Amino acid sequence: MAKQKPSPLELTPKDIFKKLNTYVIGQEKAKRAIAVAAYSHIKRISNLKLKKSTIVKKSNLLMIGPTGCGKTHIARNLAEILHLPITIADATEYSEAGYYGKDVEVMIAELLHKANGSVELAEIGIVFIDEIDKIARKGDAARTGAGSRDIGGEGVQQALLRILEGRKMFVPMNVTQHWNKHDFVEIDTSNILFICAGTFSDLRGEKTANKGGFNRPVSKPAAKKITTESLTKHGMIPELIGRLPILVKMEELSCEELSKIITVPPDSLVNQYREVMAADNVELNFDKKSLKMIVELAVKRKVGARGLRGIMEEVMHDYLFDLPNWRGKSLTITEGDVARILDE
């Protein structure tokens, strides 16, 4: 008899870490920290389902790292592992209540939508807030258009406090008409896991460009330790930092890690394009040098893992456009093909 897979509520931190490893390359320390935070979250959910009280506090996270290092990718895969709904929000789209822009309640409304309207499921889901560093509190000299109000910076941070801490609130049932106050539902955010993320480039030691080739080490300044004080100086209000107790610092991905990202995971870009081509009976292959050139270009452009798809799309565009002409054939992408297409 086949062994039954454990329920997400039965997963251990090691189980979560192992599952993350399947789809997320690199960032070992970050994956460990997130696995522990996720374990605390599912223990809270378990107690909630059993109607038990708990003294375990929410493990909201703040992820700090360069563009394309895998912050959003980790959050998406974590939600899939835990079988929980997730919504991805961009902090820059929101404003203080009463001003032009989205109110923060819309984040919860979008989570409810991802939970197919289930309030019970939405109340234990995950909200990922990207670009959190872009709503830093502005100095007096930077205030424009709203007098002394910082409606897109400190105003949004203040608005986030109440949903991160946990409270009951009315959210619109129709996210496309969030201004309509007639159709709403009450949701308790006390057990929603919030993951905030940002680059905070001024707080990190930026690596210099790799001009020495694929295997040359990248020089970098001494790593800066990110503290509550440095986050406050950046413009994050102390009350918000206090509601994000777990700080996860992520590193820029190396060439070797980018090479694995493009080929190793089950949903890697190479496997995705192979599946698309196989649907038309085309066997697709890449030689090692072609993939190496694609990775080096991603490093040169400083786009990280996120930019790999754009580069691959450039390479594959003409082949996909002429896909019917390749039916029943074998196609191998070479280093020369990549150089010709990308004109590098």
Image (tube, rainbow, N blue to C red):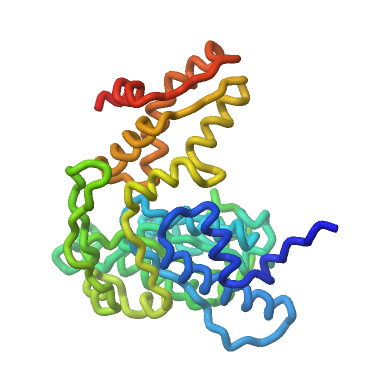
Q: Residue at x 46, y 71 (%)?
A: 33
Which of the two residues, 167 or 203, is positioned nearer the viewer here?
203
Q: Given the current orientation, which residue lies at the most extreme right position? A: 1
Q: Is residue 159 visible?
A: yes
Q: Quadrant of the C terminus?
A: top left
Percent x, y of residue 67: 33, 52
User: 6 left or right of 297?
Assistant: right
Q: Residue at x 67, y 64 (%)?
A: 121
Percent x, y of residue 208: 18, 52
Q: Is residue 126 above or below residue 190?
A: above
Q: Residue at x 21, y 52 (%)?
A: 218
Q: Quadrant of residue 4?
A: bottom right
Percent x, y of residue 104: 46, 63
Which of the two residues, 249 or 332, is positioned nearer the viewer here?
332
Q: Is residue 49 above or below residue 296?
A: below
Which of the two residues, 152 or 266, is positioned nearer the viewer here?
266
Q: Is residue 168 visible?
A: no
Percent x, y of residue 21: 52, 57
User: 242 left or right of 3?
Assistant: left
Q: Given the current orientation, which residue lies at the most extreme left position? A: 141
Q: Is residue 334 above or below residue 93?
A: above
Question: Number of labelled discs?
Answer: 0
Which of the two residues, 334 or 144, is positioned nearer the viewer here?
334
Q: Residue at x 18, y 43 (%)?
A: 212
Q: Quadrant of the N terminus?
A: bottom right
